[in-house]
Image (tube, grey):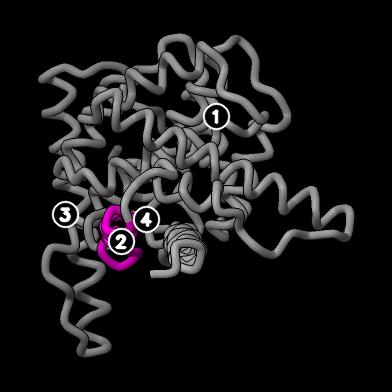
Amino acid sequence: MAAGHNIDRSLRRNRPLPAAVADAAVPAADTQDEDAAYDAAITQYEADVEHDEQAESDSRKVAKPEGKPVQMRAQTAFFTATFSVMGHITAVDGEVNQDEYRIMQMLMGRMSLTDEQRVVAERIFEQGKEADFPLFAVLKQLKRECRNNSNLLRVFLEGQLHAAYADGELNRHEKDVLVEISKRLGFNRREFARTDNMVRAQHNLETTREAGSKSGMQRTSMSVDDAYAVLGLSSHVADGDIQKAYRRQMSQHHPDKLVAKGLPEEMVRMASEKTTEIRTAYEVLRVHRNF
């Protein structure tokens, strides 16, 4: 995780990664000794960051924001867990197909990672595929650094579901591990099912748009059924429930709020696309219901 901070720092400053990061590995176990070593490494790292940022601040006469180390720790945990857990899920059924690699490459492209940063992200992804990958230890660290923020953890779960649907379906092995991940993050089966339905609807939309784009007949509007699914609703709900779901979803996925809680800044674009999808779904249902 200390190495992850270097990754995060490089992502935001667009500087070359130190050689030590290229050989970094995800923690192998969740023990008190490792926690102590982890905290010691982070303390030293934050001291270095504090020194560098103070020098920059003095040169520009700009005050450093309050709470930045805490935010940086959360961003690093989120970034590292995103790629390593994604690797674990794609390998859980015994094979990693080209669609799943494509999703990883697409994610890195949307984050505008440099070539060197892509190499590190791919290495983290490969570590997640190892048989002894410490999934539960990584999830525990993610929750701790994100301070159990449910909105941030929900966005993480959504990202993993998107990766799992890369090949068009969620197989039994992938679903089992995702249900367990959801449980470890603090969500019950009902919440998982709702999130799963939403992500599946969004994946179907993206697939339809991609197919339409290739054929030259791209669909520009969202269907009513898709709109219900994007908001996590059934068609028989009252108008007031649609409005509540819309406000809840917009609050949960607000980019600025998520970044403040620990979403890596490189993922802001994806959060903004999500809110656009939610807003579009609400408008489709508002016109359909005439309220």
Name the mark nearer the viewer: 3 or 2. Answer: 2
Q: Residue at x 46, y 58 (%)?
A: 274
Name the mark nearer the viewer: 4 or 1. Answer: 1
Task: Give 98 or 31, whichever is nearer the viewer.
Answer: 98
The residues colored magenta run 239-258
Mark 4 to mark 2 CA distance (whole Å): 29 Å
Mark 3 to mark 2 CA distance (whole Å): 34 Å
The amino acid at mark 1 is Ala
Magenta stretch: dominant secondary structure: helix
The amino acid at mark 3 is Val
Mark 1 residue element: helix
Label whose residue precedes the other's in the sequence (4 or 2): 2
Task: For the residues labelled 4 and 2, say whether their Cβ atoms are less than 8 Å apart.
Answer: no
Label whose residue precedes the other's in the sequence (4 or 1): 1
Give residue 164's mark: 1
Name the mark nearer the viewer: 4 or 2. Answer: 2
Task: For the residues labelled 4 and 3, say whether their Cβ atoms are less than 8 Å apart.
Answer: no
Label 2: which residue?
A: 243
The amino acid at mark 2 is Gln
> Residue 51, image x and y in percent?
19, 66
> Residue 10, image x and y in percent?
43, 58
Would residue 103 appear left or right of 248 to someone viewing this image? Answer: right
Task: For the residues labelled 4 and 1, say whether their Cβ atoms are less than 8 Å apart.
Answer: no
Label 4: which residue?
A: 264
Give residue 70's mark: 3
Q: Residue at x 45, y 31 (%)?
A: 84
Label whose residue precedes the other's in the sequence (4 or 3): 3
